[in-house]
Amino acid sequence: MSFGRILRGVLLALVALFFLFPLVWVALMSFMTNADILRSPPSIVFTPTLENYAALIAGELSTNVGALKIDYMQNLLNSLILSACSVVLSLLLGVPAAYAFARFKFRLGENMAFTMLSFRFAPPLLVLLPLQLYFQDLGLSDTYVGLIWVYQLITLPLILWIVRGYFEDISEDIENAYRLDGHSWLRTFLKIAVPLARPGIAAAALLAFIFAWNNFIFALILGSSSIQPVTVGALAFITASGINYGQIAAALVLSILPTLALALYAQRYLVEGLSLGAVKG
Amino acid sequence: MAFLDIAGIGKSFGKAQILDGLDLQVEKGEFVVVFGPSGAGKTVLLRLIAGILQPEAGDIRIGGASILGQGPEQRDVGMAFQNFALYPHLPAFENIASPLRGRRTAEAEIRRRVREVAELLRIGHVLDHLPKQL
């Protein structure tokens, strides 16, 4: 092994350590008591405890002035429901729309696509007040359906624009050849276009899931505690009598897990895309 | 009347008129070679017959009936593309079987005919490979 390779390995390890350090530290903190965490100087030698996780699962936040009830597991479930349903709905609406924008040139097509994109960079606070008023009138306030609908502002443009690019990269002749084989356009879309764009769809879905998962402001204003996700639920850890860092760390670790699992699962589709060449010759 | 009858067909892209009032008659079993410089409209003509493009003027008839309103899958027309247009995510077997599946051929018949073609081309041993692995 040459010196260059060793040096590169060491440098990469240092970069990885630098970027992963906060995560590793949070993971370590989740197994510490508050006393261990606040010890000065900090030490990585401590007696691990599962107390923080047990408190979260039991829904009891222990503070200096006694136990406080929190619904963190419900928040976690809410996050899962809101993010997963939003992404699935966006995929159902966004993938066919992306295909239409990629393949067919129609009047005002570009304007429509750009309008969808503009939802991404419009500040949420701009629409929150009118949304809140409308939602109360429509009875959508404080419902999963209402929040999933609003989450489309985050997930749909993302999926539409990423997947559109992937569809545009697929040679039209592959689809034409399939149609000449005697298959309908719908079958061509499902059997040729969608499988070939799968890496893009996986990437877009993963990104949309993360954005939906991280959303804070929509759920804070439009939902009550029964449907609020982890991002809002985490506010409950800041209490009048202090902050229990160990439990916050445990909550963080738990809230990272679903996204991490999804990223690992989606990875094989992302890699698959690199190994498929579209047109031979 | 010829089997394939193209009458006064016209096609333009923007301001460029590619085909203008083209007539062509082809009998069944007849071989016809269309040649011309790049950009003359050879591929456009084939795509119009296949139904991938729609003409702005004229008519295309196969066996006496106009096929203009039909999609590519309804015309029973075959076409070999310049860039092969293989399905990169499907194994060789499915690539060959696709037109038979499109015409709803029975599974046993599909197997028999794909095998037959594969033997002829001596690719019987790689039918489960993807195009890029061939």
Image: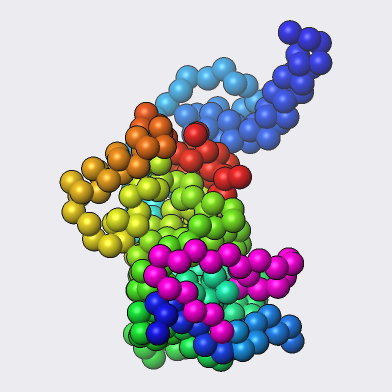
Relative to B17, is A190 on the left or the right? Answer: left
How many labels, in total? 0
- Residue segment shown in magenta: B23-44
Quadrant of the image occupied by residue A13: top right
List x then y, in percent, for residue A215. 53, 62
| Residue placed furthest toward the top | A1
List x then y, in percent, for residue A225. 39, 65
Judging depth in this view, the residue of A148 and A265 nearest the camera is: A265
The answer to whether residue B125 is seen in the rendering is: yes
Relative to A69, is A270 on the left or the right? Answer: right
* Whether residue B24 is situated above or below residue A219 in the rendered picture: below
Relative to A126, is B39 on the left or the right? Answer: right
The answer to whether residue A254 is seen in the rendering is: no
* Whether residue A17 is situated above or below residue A175 in the rendered picture: above
Judging depth in this view, the residue of A183 and A240 nearest the camera is: A183
Screen quadrant of the N terminus of chain A = top right
- The residue sitting at 59% across, 31% down in the picture is A25
Residue B27 forms part of the magenta stretch: yes
Quadrant of the image occupied by residue A11: top right
